[in-house]
Image (spheres, rainbow, N blue to C red):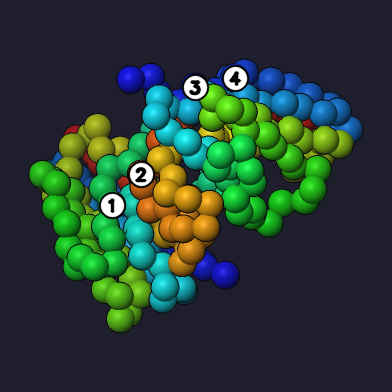
Amino acid sequence: ETGVTQSPTHLIKTRGQQVTLRCSSQSGHNTVSWYQQALGQGPQFIFQYYREEENGRGNFPPRFSGLQFPNYSSELNVNALELDDSALYLCASSLGQGASTLNTGELFFGEGSRLTVL
Amino acid sequence: GENVEQHPSTLSVQEGDSAVIKCTYSDSASNYFPWYKQELGKRPQLIIDIRSNVGEKKDQRIAVTLNKTAKHFSLHITETQPEDSAVYFCAAIPANQGGKLIFGQGTELSVKP
């Protein structure tokens, strides 16, 4: 059974640029959630994807967008990068029970992608 | 929306002592409360969780208690060891928002040998 993998592990961008982060979910998991963790803070929910559709979104602007692919892997895209976007971006996978039903399954986190915006 | 408050922000104990971290939540309909341990530069790892139909759960040296009436839950670590040193996060899932974990601010636990 493979765990959650994320790429790249580290990257540096400048303000205004765009970035794409990638996540492969744990084998058998159909739901992927993305979190932003600023230094010294708890992770903050960005959005979740279930069966290729966005299924819940946190308080993040539209320049944060995502995709989920048929193999349940996912991408997080951030446009027009700002300095405050510097953070650790965590992907978590779980086994969902339906887009409209409560998923209280355990979340398995990847090691994260550390983004620095200069 | 759901809000999770966590205390203390830092906690220092001697090896062998117990450590207690407390969290409160605002959404009475929340029904899943996991605790994560995050070592420096590493991913958050689930150490224990509790669902709203249970008042207490124990796994070796770790236990979690839940008081639904008061809307608070606590993590108890007994016989602490230096390898327990890490940042601990509590979290809650709001009602009908599966997968959307709302995290507390974290507690940095330091266990001194």
The residue carrying mark 2 is A106
Q: Considering the numbered disc 4 on the image, is that residue within a helix, a strand or a loop?
A: strand
Judging depth in this view, the residue of A11 and B52 nearest the camera is B52
Question: What is the spatial separation of the Cα atoms under label 4 and label 2, in whole angstroms?
Answer: 22 Å
Left or right, B13 with respect to A13, comes to left
* Residue identifier under label 4: A7
Q: Are marks 2 and 1 on the same chain?
A: no
Q: Chain of mark 3?
A: A
Q: Residue A36: x, y in percent?
A: 61, 42
Horizontal side, residue A19 vs residue A31: left or right: right
Q: Same chain for the residues at labels 1 and 4, yes or no? A: no
Q: Amino acid at mark 3?
A: Thr
Which mark is in front, 2 or 1? Answer: 2
Q: Confirm or deny contact between disc 4 and disc 3 (CB under 8 A).
A: yes
- Assess whether mark 2 and mark 4 are in contact (beta carbons under 8 angstroms): no
Q: Which amino acid, mark 1? A: Asp
Label 1 marks a residue whose chain is: B
- Height in image: B78 above or below A91? below
Mark 4 or mark 2, whichever is nearer to me:
2
Packing grade of label 2 (10 A; few <14, some 14-19, many >=20) is some
Mark drawn on residue A5: 3
Residue furthest to the bottom? B69
Where residue A118 sits, quadrant-wise, is top right
Disc 1 target residue:
B49
Q: Residue at x 33, y 20 (%)?
A: A1
Query: Callout 2: helix, strand or loop?
Result: loop
Taking the spot 69% from the left edge, 20% from the top edge, the residue there is A11
The numbered mark, 2 or 3, whose residue comes first in the sequence reads: 3
Residues A39 and B66: in front is B66
